[in-house]
Amino acid sequence: MSARAESGGGRPTAYGDPVTDPTAAGDEHAAPTEHRQWRFTAPPGATTLLLIRHGESAAARDDQPFDLVGGHGDPPLHPQGRAQAALLAERLGHEPITAAYVTTLRRTVETARPLLDRLGLQAEVEPDLREVFLGEWENEKYRRYMAERHPLAMRVWQEERWDLIPGAEPAEQFAERVGAAVERIAARHPDELVAVFTHGGVIGAILALATRSRPFAFVGADNGSISELVLMPDRWVLRSYNDTAHLRDLPDTPVG
């Protein structure tokens, strides 16, 4: 936010709001000037993204592998995920969202549908916001190995690298593609609020770029959660992470 001065003795504050100096007008007995705490406001041209993790997807079973799309496992939403999507629509249905994005994977499309119907919007597909490719662990293997605490699965989390998995997407390549996708969306939507329905690994990668944190510092966003990111020309600002207030009353026991 740029500083500005005004006539009549005004001077800019650190955040650009003028503060009137009573002594500048010659009135030494005027009431003291108050300095209220600053509230963040996105500057002109900034884009605000609501990064929404898809709802819970169908359970993985060894005897029923998911369909593959571009090599990625493509499960539908679990009934619990559909309930999360409905609550998301209630939460965001009155927000001034002007555009929405989904990925090539159906769990994002199904999560977005209730909100899109409510807002009367059509989502655009951004392929580069699809989940990290897990190579030989795509489909049901990733969840199974994590549940079994497979030694390599433990190393993935300890070393914070998906590409320890055989055939998985290289870490630098993954970060580059999701970062480029975010930049493209920001360029298309200055001064807009955009809903982006994506995946846990993608949200983690985007927020690691934004905050220059460890690679997995933000891996773990809950299904149906909302994280807010403001993109400015010179920096990205994380405003909130893993907001699930709208899911508070949803029972942990799967519905349906």
Image: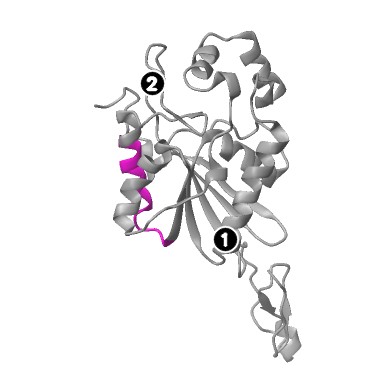
Along the line of sight, the residue nearer the viewer: 65 or 198 = 65
Q: Which quarter of the picture shows residue 152? A: top right
Q: Residue at x 68, y 25 (%)?
A: 163
Q: Which quarter of the picture shows residue 6? A: bottom right
Return the mark for residue 59: 2
| Quarter in which the C terminus is drawn | top left
Return the mark for residue 47: 1
The crowding category of the residue bearing disc 2, from other C-alpha atoms within 10 Å (few below 14, some 14 to 19, many at least 20), is few
Our reading of the magenta stretch's main secondary structure is: helix
Percent x, y of residue 211: 69, 44
Percent x, y of residue 147: 51, 12
What amino acid type should be assigned to the residue bearing mark 2?
A: Ala
Q: Which quarter of the picture shows residue 61? A: top left
Nearer the N terminus, badge 1 or badge 2? 1
Percent x, y of residue 217: 65, 33
First to last magenta residue range: 83-97
> What secondary structure is marked by label 2?
loop
**Residue 55: in magenta span:** no
Q: Comparing marks 1 and 2, which lies closer to the viewer?
A: 2
Along the line of sight, the residue nearer the viewer: 162 or 27 = 162
One can see residue 41 in this view: no
